[in-house]
Amino acid sequence: MPADASAPPLAGLRIIEFAGIGPGPFAGMMLADMGAEIIRIERPGAASPTGQGAHELEFLARGRKSIALNMKKPGALDLALELIESADGLIEGFRPGVMERLGLGPDVCLERNPRLVYGRMTGWGQEGPVSKTAGHDLNYIALSGALYASGEGDRAPTFPLNLLGDFGGGGMFLAFGMVTGLLKVARTGKGDVVDAAIVDGTAALMAMIYSRRAMGVWRDERASNALDGGVPWYGVYECADGQWVTIGSLEPQFWAVLLDKLGLTAEDMGDRADRSQWPAMRARLTEIFLSQPRDHWVALLQDTDACFAPVLSMAEAPDHPHNQARGIFSDGPVQPMPAPRFTHSDTPLPSTPPQPGADSRTVLETLGLASGKIETLFKEGVVS
């Protein structure tokens, strides 16, 4: 590891990433944001991961080096194993068994590199009755119980984009597993295999909700609990201009601040402990917030302890003063900056996502291959 204490926290680590979509690249982005060297193995002529737009706008692939490797060509397997032998970790997001069929399963790779942390990203996991079937974020959060608990009570469950499954329960848990495995290697010298499944991670994110349910203070009915929109003092309200604001006055002292700012008293609003009064309380708040545009409520409530924030669009969020003061977004093209932050380590915005194969020659040179060997690999189409 580098001696410079101000270097990014993961500087000096090398991770081999087999190109994919969604949660695997997000985990790679998190590691790259923290300074790890990520070498991305891609297919020659691969389209952008989403199939839309330019490679340089695929923010999940930022901070990488890219080598285009044709695994159907003789010599590609040996070259991939050389890369893996030089690495601290590996990330792959294929269905169970695909890497084994390529000759790059965990047993083979760990035999070549016993210190390797081999990260596997799937939806269902490496084992289980449905592990071999296709799926997406929505399916995985459905199986964990998280989807059922989300949304309004009289409508179908609502899914929060693909943030909860792909990125929360998937990519972040893979990144956590990789760092945990790397810490284990530092202590024991022995690598490991990380089986990161979105259904596992999403269930783990539900730990507090399952805890409250076990205590008998969480109902299975949607929108009937404190954190799912069931209470009037924790929700989203429309304003006179068609915009929205959020209120999160869960604690009595914050509720008192909100009422004071709205010119109300506890007697005006009723007893929060009495569920029968909640519909009337919600109707009162709905009427109040509909009486003025969003900017009015921002001016009145934003700098108070009422637990308030306006609902901002993606176009608006980068311009909010708080987000600007903290530098949460880059200037352009607008993208989220690395998180979390460190007091004594720099985590700048990584380099632009590369074109597939943009760093093929450089990566081969770092392996110490002779120039003649490199030219042969290009000529034979093993790399491009």
Image (spheres, helix red, strand yellow):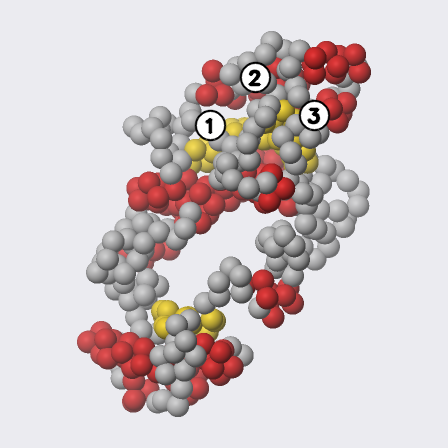
Say if 90 sits above or below 50 in the image: above
Q: Which image quadrant is residue 286 in?
A: bottom left
Q: Front-most of 111 and 57?
A: 57
The numbered mark, 3 or 1, whose residue comes first in the sequence reads: 1
Per the rendering, the mark at residue 94 is 1
Question: Dot 1: within a 10 Å radius of its alpha carbon, few (fewer than 14), some, or many (20 or more) residues?
Answer: some
The kind of residue on which mark 1 rests is Phe
Q: Is residue 47 visible?
A: yes
The numbered mark, 2 or 1, whose residue comes first in the sequence reads: 2
Give the CA separation, mark 3 to mark 2. Answer: 14 Å
Q: Which residue is mark 2?
A: 71
SS category of the residue bearing label 3 = helix
SS category of the residue bearing label 2 = loop
Please identify the residue farthest to the front as the structure is shown: 53
Q: Residue at x 51, y 44 (%)?
A: 172
Q: Which residue is mark 3?
A: 360
Per the rendering, the mark at residue 82 is none
Q: Position of residue 112 (x, y in %)?
A: 62, 17
Q: Front-most of 299 and 197?
A: 299
The kind of residue on which mark 2 rests is Met
Question: Dot 3: within a 10 Å radius of its alpha carbon, few (fewer than 14), some, or many (20 or more) residues?
Answer: many
Q: From the viewer's perspective, is 295 left or right of 202? A: right
Q: Residue at x 61, y 58 (%)?
A: 329
Question: Dot 2: within a 10 Å radius of its alpha carbon, few (fewer than 14), some, or many (20 or more) residues?
Answer: many
Determine whether label 2 and label 1 are within 8 Å by CB: no
